[in-house]
Amino acid sequence: MTLSKALVPTQSLPIRALMVLGGSVFIALAAQISVPMIPVPMTLQTLAILIVGLSYGARMGALTVAAYLAEGAMGLPVFANGGNGLAFAGPTAGFLFGFVFMAWAAGFAADRGVKGVLPVALVALAVSALLYVPGVAWAMAADSLFGLDASKWGADSFASVWTWYIAPFLPGDAVKAVIAALVVSGGWAALKGRGA
């Protein structure tokens, strides 16, 4: 059982639609809390995605992130620094698409009953690390696949990818994984405390 099902045991279609909408707005707001870095900004977007996935479960988490991406594709300024669908042709596109898997994988662990700060933090760390696979793959392959100039993104070699896309974000990812674990574990503790 996920945290959202424990909070709202009867999830009708309208309730689930409101949860998806609320979760996508939560992610969009977190994306606006940004530390500008070149070429990829550091945001609280991944923290929100982890919380959504760990709270909603695999299917609802992935659906929520897919809705968030659709909002951006429609031109809404939901991505980092008010970005929209144009981000799908930039250096962050691989990360954007990887967010769906990130939410699904975190939710998959939640669906299987992973609870407690340490186990949830370890899941969140692993899922955060896996996000680099599509993110870096896109940044490095975009030039050969789509004719984009990846060198202007700092993605023309693994050394530059490490410098610009991975190393600066690792400490923040670790902190966000722990925060997500604390938030979700705190939600479970609050439910237990009120006898739910």
Image: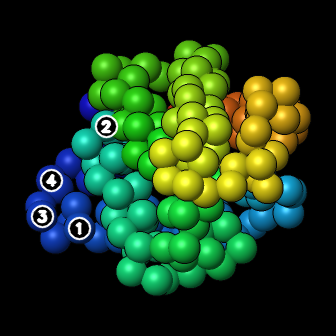
Residue at the image position 48 percent from the left and 83 percent from the top = 76
- Can residue 90 be seen in this snapshot? yes
Please tell me whether mark 3 sits on a helix, a strand or a loop.
helix
Number of on-image labels: 4
Please say which color scheme the image uses: rainbow
Of mark 4 and mark 2, the one earlier in the sequence is 4
What amino acid type should be assigned to the residue bearing mark 4? Thr
Q: Nearer the viewer, residue 152 or 28?
A: 152
Q: Which residue is mark 3?
A: 13
Could you say which is closer to the camera, residue 167 or residue 162?
Answer: 162
At x 64%, y 38%, the residue is: 140
Instruction: Evaluate if marks 3 and 1 touch, with contact meaning CB atoms under 8 Å apart.
Output: yes
Query: In the image, 134: left or right of 4?
Result: right
Residue 100 sits above or below residue 21 on the image: above
Q: Kindly report which numbered mark, 4 or 3, lies closer to the viewer in this rendering.
A: 3
Residue plotted at (78% across, 64% down) = 34
Residue 56 found in image quarter: top left
Q: Which residue is mark 2?
A: 58
Disc nearest the viewer among 2 and 3: 2
Q: Are marks 4 and 2 in contact (CB under 8 Å)?
A: no
What's the amino acid at mark 1? Ala
Q: Which residue is mark 4?
A: 10
Query: Considering only order in the chain, which callout, 4 or 1, is on the residue closer to the N terminus?
Result: 4
In x, y percent, where is residue 126? Answer: 58, 21
